[in-house]
Image (spheres, coloured by chain):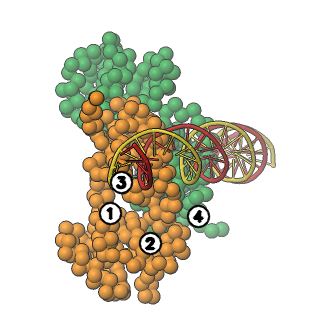
Chain colours: A green, B orange, C red, D yellow
Amino acid sequence: MSKILIVEDESDIAELISLHLNREGHEAICIGNGLQVMPAVLAQQPEIIVLDLMLPGLDGMQIFKRLRADTRTASIPVIILTAKGQVTDKIAGLELGADDYLTKPFSPRELYLRISAVLRRVKKVTHVSEIQRGRFMLDRKNMKLFLDGTALDLTTIEFKLLTTLMENDTAVHSRADLLRDVWGYNSDVATRTLDTHIKRLREKLGAAGEHIVTIRGTGFQFQTELAATQPA
Amino acid sequence: MSKILIVEDESDIAELISLHLNREGHEAICIGNGLQVMPAVLAQQPEIIVLDLMLPGLDGMQIFKRLRADTRTASIPVIILTAKGQVTDKIAGLELGADDYLTKPFSPRELYLRISAVLRRVKKVTHVSEIQRGRFMLDRKNMKLFLDGTALDLTTIEFKLLTTLMENDTAVHSRADLLRDVWGYNSDVATRTLDTHIKRLREKLGAAGEHIVTIRGTGFQFQTELAATQPA
DNA sequence: TGTCACCGTGACGAATCCGTCACGCTTGTT
DNA sequence: AACAAGCGTGACGGATTCGTCACGGTGACA
């Protein structure tokens, strides 16, 4: 289904991953330390890149930066793999703008889930500047929300939270997903923080706050059309 | 060049405007109080709408809200015309999300300039989620700036300011334009505030702050390629 | 060279925003 | 009905952000 580039030197891991991915219907391309073929592979426009930071003789971070600096590759989502020790040193320190990261050891299943999640997220982003959902209209350019035609001011977090919810109004967004999408990684924010922001958002929306529905035990969902409330 | 819808009851003003616009190569369509034809005209997808708030028997604000609430018309930029007295009452109060507004009396020339400015601004917005300019990469989705591949955190205003500058890196952005684009109308912010934010932005950019160039007496400009500095 | 408008800069106070916590209600289960 | 887990809510302190001002430097122009 999707073309996936894997940059990983440990051949057993690479093989395991690609086997797993190919079985799921994806097309995995593996590169070890033979990085000279990378431009050729990039020319095939992979949809997502899995990059191990621990490569022999070369800093994976350099590769990552180069990917981001090049117009043709800057928009390709990257999932980063690291060994345990590196995490706090490198990743946690700099907000590197990867789409996800995994620390070894991990199960192929987990990586696959992450890849699916990233792909799902990215593909949603047709990124029109305006999102219309019933009474709501999100204006990304001016970071404003129009409710029934009147403008509402949202804070950065509120806007991002609502955007995330509205971008996929059929899905239920788990607490973990929301925390990651809105706050990013290194997000050591308490899970109750999410509740607080949901509350503040609902407050600003007034009665329309009901469109943000709690899915008990899972997360939250934006419902464009409210389910009819049957009176007693 | 562009199709422009004018909703204005005072026929002399409407005529004056449309004459002026047609002479400039635009296609102006005027509607007075015969609003029943409006849907038909909207179906022709005008690129911009000029709306007088003072219409006999009908509140122009209602029309505006209806335009904004309808998916098909929500993205059409609107320039609002008002008489002097209304401004403080209506406009200043609600952040209505118009693209510009003018108070009567005004010169047709001024309106034409505003229309041009709005059209120029809107057309720039192909709104890809990422803007690449030399060493800079703006990530709208995550509101982040990548400089040489490393992420920089900007505040809301800083991000919007830089975005505005970068979206049109050939143009010089006047102080008034920047104030309007970043702060919106009702922006009673002092003009020095802009300087302060420019400074803070340059500070965060470090040496790369030189890409924001001061055009003395006019405003600022983002230059993707720095003009070579000749040493003495 | 002198003058003046324009701009850069640092400091400051106010306002906003944000994360956390404690408490209590709700929901679902036994 | 009793209990526990999940969630809503209000309050609080800290951090960030923002707008303003005063001062000094710089460039333009006569």
Q: Is residue A195 above or below residue A38?
A: below
The answer to whether residue B16 is left or right of residue B142 is left
Picture quadrant where residue A112 is located: top left
Calculate the distance from the C-alpha at mark 2 to the C-alpha at mark 4: 19 Å
Three-letter amino acid code at the position of disc 2: Lys
Instruction: Give the mark toward the camera: 1 or 3.
Output: 3
Identify the residue at image location x=42%, y=84%: B55
Q: Which of marks 1 and 2 is in front?
A: 1
Residue B208's label in the rendered image is none
Circle nearer the N terminus (1, 2)? 2
Label placed on residue A207: 4
| Chain holding disc 2 | B
Point 44% across, 45% down: residue: B198
Look at the numbered disc 4 and give the secondary structure of its residue.
helix
Q: Nearer the viewer, mark 3 or mark 4?
A: 3
Q: Are marks 2 and 3 in contact (CB under 8 Å)?
A: no
